[in-house]
């Protein structure tokens, strides 16, 4: 799966004295990864930007990880072969998992075209803290939008291994949420995502432990 040298076997994970629960209680929210997957031009980043803005308004700790931004920095050494795409996702999964452990709400805007890598992300991060959001947009619509001119280049054979044209996109089998951009505006899509994640937006302590449900037993209004 990974590109490069394997990790040496003389490393030991350094345990701290602050638990995940303590971090979440301090932030009054749960660590959560919302993974927006879909074709290039589907609207993943546009929707995530809107969600991020709304969460900041509500006083939440949130960060957006965008595919292009990460490739301009952390993953600038990677190309677009299948192995390098998988490594691109593996690295961002590790980053997203760290954000989750810190109690941060993380919006991940990556095509992640292969199901096995999205399944890897869910397993690594944990199903209870992972929401797969399929931003569904017809390929013809994406080609018509083409905000970065990438489809034009791919169709002119200027770009190799381009998802949807010369490389496959494997649709999610069972996403947690489907956003059909043919039916919903950016604002409506953002509200649907906010509704989906609402149980994670408060962190309530009760006698039996911590509770993730925003309106549990009428504790919250």
Image (tube, rainbow, N blue to C red):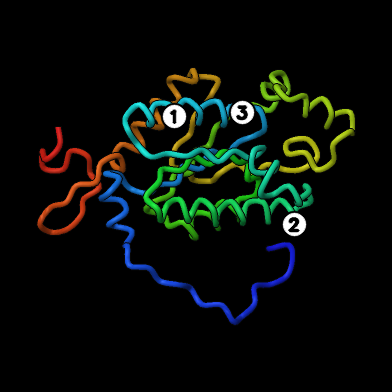
Residue 12 lies, in percent from the top left, at 51, 77
Q: Is residue 134 left or right of residue 41?
A: left
Number of other residues with Cα within 10 Å of mark 2, as a class: few under 14, some 14 to 19, many 20 or more: few
Q: Earlier in the sequence, mark 3 or mark 2?
A: 3
Residue 11 lies, in percent from the top left, at 56, 77
| Tag 2 residue | 83
Q: Is 20 placed above or below 66 here?
A: below
Nearer to the camera, 77 or 157: 77
Nearer to the camera, 19 or 122: 19
Number of other residues with Cα within 10 Å of mark 3, as a class: few under 14, some 14 to 19, many 20 or more: many
Instruction: Kindly report which numbered mark, 2 or 1, lies closer to the viewer in this rendering.
Output: 1
Q: CA distance from mark 2 to mark 1?
A: 31 Å
| Tag 3 residue | 42
**Label 2: element kind:** helix
Instruction: Kindly report which numbered mark, 3 or 1, lies closer to the viewer in this rendering.
Output: 1
Q: Is residue 30 left or right of residue 49?
A: left
Q: State if disc 1 and disc 3 touch (CB < 8 Å).
A: no
The label shown at residue 51 is 1
Q: CA distance from mark 3 to mark 1?
A: 16 Å
Residue ID at (63%, 51%): 89
The quadrant in which the C terminus is found is: top left
Nearer to the camera, 39 or 51: 51
Q: State if disc 1 and disc 2 touch (CB < 8 Å).
A: no
């Amino acid at each position: 799966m990974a590109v490069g040298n394997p990790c040496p076997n003389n490393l030991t994970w350094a345990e701290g004295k602050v638990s995940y629960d303590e971090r979440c209680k301090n932030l009054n929210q749960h660590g959560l990864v919302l993974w927006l997957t879909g074709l290039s031009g589907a609207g993943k980043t546009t929707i995530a930007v809107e969600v991020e803005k709304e969460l900041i308004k509500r006083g939440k700790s949130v960060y957006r990880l965008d595919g292009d931004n990460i490739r301009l920095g952390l993953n600038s050494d990677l190309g677009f072969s299948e192995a390098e795409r998988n490594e691109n996702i593996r690295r961002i999964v590790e980053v997203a998992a760290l954000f989750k452990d810190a109690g941060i709400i993380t919006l991940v805007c990556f095509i992640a075209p292969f199901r096995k890598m999205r399944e890897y992300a869910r397993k690594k991060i944990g199903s209870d803290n992972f929401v797969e959001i399929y931003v569904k947009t017809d390929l013809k619509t994406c080609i018509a939008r083409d905000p970065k001119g990438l489809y034009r280049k791919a169709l002119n054979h200027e770009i190799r291994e381009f998802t949807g044209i010369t490389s496959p996109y494997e649709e999610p089998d069972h996403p947690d949420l489907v956003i059909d951009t043919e039916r919903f505006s950016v604002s409506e899509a953002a509200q649907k995502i906010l509704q989906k994640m609402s149980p994670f937006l408060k962190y309530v302590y009760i006698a039996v432990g911590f509770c993730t449900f925003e309106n549990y037993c009428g504790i919250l209004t």
